[in-house]
Amino acid sequence: MSTRLLVLGSSIASGLGERGRPFPRLLAEALGDPPLLDLSKSGRLIDESLALRAEIAAFAPTLAVLQHGSAESIVHPGPFVNRVINQFAPSSWHGVAGLYPRAYYSRDPHRRRRQHRTSRLKVAIKRMVIPMSRGRSRMTPETFAVQLVELIAMLHGLGCDVVVLGVHPRDERLFPRSPAAGDRVDAIIRRIAETDPRIVFVDLVATLRCWEDYLEDRLHWNPDGHMRVTAAIVAAATPLLDARDERSLTSADRHVRAADRSS
């Protein structure tokens, strides 16, 4: 049976800063360029992927890779701070990623220095206001767990094999309180994967090197990181693909035998 590859996730999967070679594209190449539906998007949460069920069903994937849990577990300042920033700060500071450090910088030395200063200022403000404003993640771990179970059930209902990626390490200095929040979500993903033999878990903590496989924000991955994750996914998905091929061959053999008997 031919593979039809689906990827769901946030800016990690969409390759922010990676400039054209994120792991979904590398994975498709490694699997022989099957049809690919990449629905990853910067800031996309798992409930937003669930809302795409009609598009997913129409594509009829046979293998899905889920990169969720990172965007859901990053800790942000409280709502009051966000309102103040949206009212008084430059537009580049607005939105979900408004206080994130830059993932990459300009090659022009003057512009690069300015970008570094701005990035350091954002991080300093974030480190100060998150404790003051009772910073929180965009989704609670409990809600994430419910959504992940629902998403996997929907994919299995389509006859789709599932590979789930864990939550990769983040730098506490650049994303205060986010590493601990990510660890909690990573534990949830592991636990859900362990309860269902049809799910394969990819351990990003063991896969990625800190911080050699990251861009400068220590959140998004550089080309080495995307290649390492691709290799880990291929290793995890190969037994699923082999089993699917075996089932397909067995089914074809049954049809041949039935045809022989009828003749």
Image (cartoon, rainbow, N blue to C red):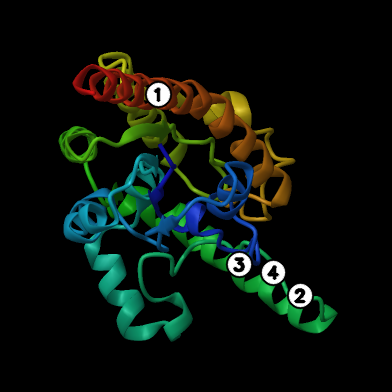
Q: Nearer the viewer, mark 3 or mark 1?
A: 1
Residue on which the image places disc 4 = 116
- The mark nearer the N terminus, 3 or 2, is 2
- The mark nearer the N terminus, 3 or 1, is 3
Residue beneath the point at 80% across and 83% down: 110
Measuring from the top left, give residue 94's x and y in whole percent: 38, 76
Q: Which mark is residue 113?
A: 2
Classify residue 113 as left or right of residue 37: right
What distance separates the C-alpha of mark 4 from that of mark 1?
57 Å
- The mark nearer the N terminus, 2 or 1, is 2
What distance separates the C-alpha of mark 3 from that of mark 2?
10 Å
Residue on which the image places disc 3 = 119
Measuring from the top left, give residue 80's x and y in whole percent: 23, 66
Q: Nearer the viewer, mark 2 or mark 1?
A: 1
Amino acid, disc 2: Arg
Asked if the residues shown at circle 3 and circle 4 are in contact, with their CB atoms under 8 angstroms apart, the answer is yes
Element class at badge 2:
helix
